[in-house]
């Protein structure tokens, strides 16, 4: 009976996956932007779906979504426009891939390992490339904001259920058998199978709402969502998510246009008060973190792997050890022979199989060791150029929603850049897709605004946004290349946050 039930479950899951794929293909051809939103939702919830159903194949929904997006969106643009939208960061991602493949060949990495290892790093950039091929316009952005708000409300609703019935919720949706607790409090997971997913996602949502209130408008609803996402992020009890979100929020407000008197006054008043009120728990966290990373670096996965990645990079310079060989999910899943050489099998959390839970607790050792220092620099440079695209829109667009998308692009890459020191955020669901998707939208908007202001837009007939247009006195073309000289524009004074 158990075998029959397993077969029925597997067949049902396969039928559902096939039907969902067919619907997604149809949507991509008829309503590609809606399909893009569905793909993002799939990438974010794929691990949860796998955990709930028990079907491991469904955990690859994010990879399938990325492949479909590239094939459908790029193919659609080639059919309609006869061209592909390009961006300078593509050359750096390409160089990263080439360096990794050369390193793999030189070190005799099996083709299957090299392929899966390379795709792990490139699935985010591939999703950015696919989304950038769609003709995003400023008129789409209010709907994007509404869809995002709807998803945030869904997450917050699941958090409420999580609070009310933590045991049954974790038994149904949690990856671990026991409830995770920090300082005697239950760490919430929301619709994700681990608190990490909720903490990082809500940190990013908090930043997006904060920027929306700055660039577009303030309302009772987005005030409630701002408070809700902030509390949800804290309730996940992930130090890296809270710290990265707070640092990014403060940094973004410091670089945003507009008066900063209220911002500086608030910092001068609230920071000392927060330190006085929360000094004891803050020092407890700082002390425990310091001990964790300095007491025995040979037993701390993140520190040990970073040091070993540097030694591997220096030994293999100018190449690396090959895709899927060190620091990545692929290396842990196939348990790289390098791990045995380093004696990881004898270290807690760094062994093979289920004993390797700490092998993917950081990001940069993987590209550094697998593709060499040149590969890691290329990957970092590509991420930086995507963030620069958002920076240009944030500072030089004449439209509130467009500036908002630019700001979100910068904020999300900044906060995940901070988290990447201690988490593989650029390759792991549920958060990996978000910065690349918003960067894809920003890339398309940059192209659209450049073409419109030059009078060469043959892709669409933009509609005047009316109330969205800010009262700037000058409109000039945005630079195509991120390193090109930025145009000088006068802006209206935006409301201080």
Image (tube, helix red, strand yellow):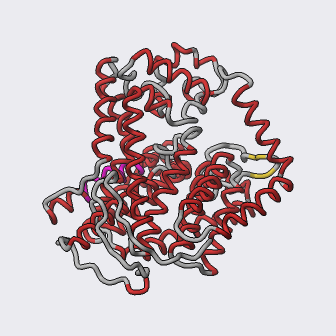
Q: Residue furthest bottom?
A: 466
Q: Does 70 lie within the magenta span?
A: yes
Q: Quadrant of residue 267?
A: bottom right
Provide residue 157's location: percent of width, then percent of height: 64, 68
In the displayed structure, 495 sits above or below 346; it is below
Provide residue 250's location: percent of width, then percent of height: 63, 58
Depth check: give the residue in front, 48 or 317.
317
Q: Residue furthest top?
A: 341
Depth check: give the residue in front, 268 or 189.
268
In the displayed structure, 292 sits above or below 7; it is above
Q: Main secondary structure of the magenta part?
A: helix
Q: Does 393 lie within the magenta span?
A: no
In the displayed structure, 226 sits above or below 484; it is below
Q: Residue at x 61, y 50 (%)?
A: 244
Which quadrant is home to the C terminus?
Answer: bottom right
Provide residue 457's location: percent of width, then percent of height: 20, 71
Left or right: 32 with respect to 416?
Answer: left
In magenta, the rendered stretch is 62-73
């Amino acid at each position: 009976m158990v075998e029959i039930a397993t077969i029925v479950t597997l067949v049902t899951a396969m039928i559902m996956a096939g039907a969902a794929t067919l619907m997604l293909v149809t949507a991509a051809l008829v309503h590609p932007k809606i399909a893009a939103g569905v793909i993002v939702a799939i990438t974010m919830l794929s691990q949860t779906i796998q955990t709930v159903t028990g079907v491991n194949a469904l955990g690859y929904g994010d990879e399938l979504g990325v492949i479909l997006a590239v094939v459908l969106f790029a193919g659609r643009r080639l059919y309609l426009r006869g061209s592909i939208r390009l961006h300078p960061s593509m050359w750096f991602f390409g160089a990263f891939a080439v360096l990794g493949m050369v390193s793999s060949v030189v070190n005799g990495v099996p083709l299957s390992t090299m392929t899966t290892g390379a795709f792990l790093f490139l699935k985010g950039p591939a999703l950015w490339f696919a989304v950038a091929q769609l003709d995003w316009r400023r008129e789409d952005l209010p709907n994007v904001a509404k869809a995002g708000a709807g998803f945030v409300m869904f997450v917050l609703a699941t958090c409420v259920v999580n609070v009310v019935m933590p045991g049954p919720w974790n038994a149904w949706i949690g990856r671990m058998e026991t409830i995770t607790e920090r300082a005697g409090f239950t760490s919430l997971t929301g619709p994700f199978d681990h608190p990490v997913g909720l903490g990082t996602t809500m940190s990013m949502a908090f930043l997006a709402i904060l920027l929306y209130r700055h660039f577009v408008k303030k309302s009772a609803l987005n005030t409630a969502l701002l408070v809700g996402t902030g509390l949800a992020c804290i309730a996940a009890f992930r130090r890296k998510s809270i710290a990265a979100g707070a640092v990014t929020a403060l940094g973004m407000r410091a670089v945003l246009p507009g008066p900063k008197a209220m911002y500086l006054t608030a910092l001068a008043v609230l920071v000392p008060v927060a330190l006085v009120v929360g000094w004891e728990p803050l020092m407890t966290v700082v002390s425990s973190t310091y001990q964790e990373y300095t007491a025995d670096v040979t037993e701390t996965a993140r520190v040990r792997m970073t040091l070993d990645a540097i030694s591997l990079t220096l030994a293999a310079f100018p190449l690396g050890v090959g895709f899927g060989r060190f620091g990545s999910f692929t290396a842990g899943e196939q348990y790289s022979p390098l791990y045995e050489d380093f004696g990881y099998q004898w270290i807690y959390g760094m062994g093979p199989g289920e004993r390797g839970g700490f092998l993917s607790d950081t990001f940069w050792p993987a590209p550094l060791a697998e593709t060499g220092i040149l590969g890691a620099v290329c990957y970092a440079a590509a991420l930086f150029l995507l963030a620069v695209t958002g920076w240009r829109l944030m500072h030089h667009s004449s439209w509130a929603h467009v500036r908002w998308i630019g700001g979100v692009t910068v904020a999300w890459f900044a906060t995940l850049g901070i988290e990447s020191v201690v988490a593989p955020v650029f390759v792991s669901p549920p958060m990996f897709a978000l910065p690349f998707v918003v960067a894809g939208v920003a890339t398309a908007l940059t192209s659209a605004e450049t073409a419109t202001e030059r009078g060469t837009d043959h892709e669409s007939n933009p509609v005047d946004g009316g109330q969205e247009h800010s009262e700037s006195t000058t409109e000039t073309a945005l630079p195509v290349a991120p390193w090109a000289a930025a145009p000088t524009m006068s802006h209206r004074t935006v409301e201080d946050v």
